[in-house]
Image: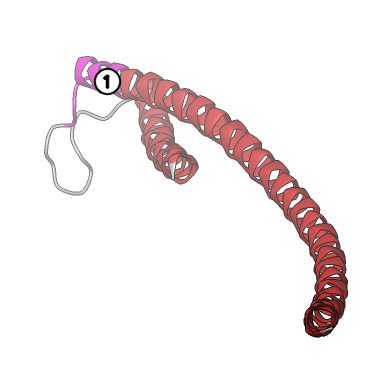
Amino acid sequence: RKYDMATMELKSAKRQLSHLQSEWNLSSTLQDASQTDPPKTCHTCGQPLVSLTAQKHVMESIEEKLNAAILVVDTAKESASIASIEYTEANANEEGLGLKAQSSLKLLREAEERLSHETDGLRQKIKHARLIQSDLSAEFASLARRAKEVSEFNLVK
């Protein structure tokens, strides 16, 4: 946004400078023509022409405006340049952050996959341990019944 604003200000300042330069060129042409042998009245309408003092005042006014416009253009160029640098740095930073995020995401996926394999391995070990426990429990129950039978047989004897 700052870059766009600086660019628009620069274009506007350049248009204003161009307009003032056109005025300057026109005034210079009139002044050059008036120095040769200025006519006292307009050859078409008969009205008195502007005095040399008035022409000089107009030229000074245009020159001041021209200098001010040049200063505005220079300032706008500097602002646009700074905004362009900031824009470039922001894009580079954004690209760097994007690459870093992608790298972090890849590491996260690899860690998730590794932990998933470890979890699967632990589940298999737990399943195997439960089967062994189930077999041992069944065997223990069988032995306990047999011990009870032997004990009852010995009591009967």
Location of residue 84 (image quadrant): top right
Q: Position of residue 122 (x, y in %)?
A: 83, 63
Q: Position of residue 65 (x, y in %)?
A: 32, 24
* Total labels drawn: 1
Q: Is residue 32 above or below residue 95?
A: above
Looking at the image, residue 119 sits to the left or right of residue 90; the answer is right
Q: Position of residue 85 (x, y in %)?
A: 62, 32
Work out which quarter of the rendered image holds the N terminus and state it. top left
Based on the picture, tell me whether residue 52 belongs to the magenta stretch.
yes
Work out which quarter of the rendered image holds the C terminus and state it. bottom right
Looking at the image, residue 102 sits to the left or right of residue 46; the answer is right
Which amino acid, by three-letter code, is at mark 1? Ser
Looking at the image, residue 38 sits to the left or right of residue 29; the answer is left
> Residue lying furthest front in this view?
157
Residue at the spot 52% in from the left edge and 25% down from the top edge: 78
Q: Secondary structure at mark 1?
A: helix
Q: Work out whether residue 16 or residue 89 is closer to the camera in this orientation and state it.
A: 89
Q: Position of residue 92 (x, y in %)?
A: 69, 40
Residue where numbered disc 1 is placed: 61
Disc 1 packing (10 Å; few <14; some 14–19; many ≥20): few
Residue at the spot 41% in from the left edge and 42% down from the top edge: 5
Which residues are drawn in magenta? 49-60
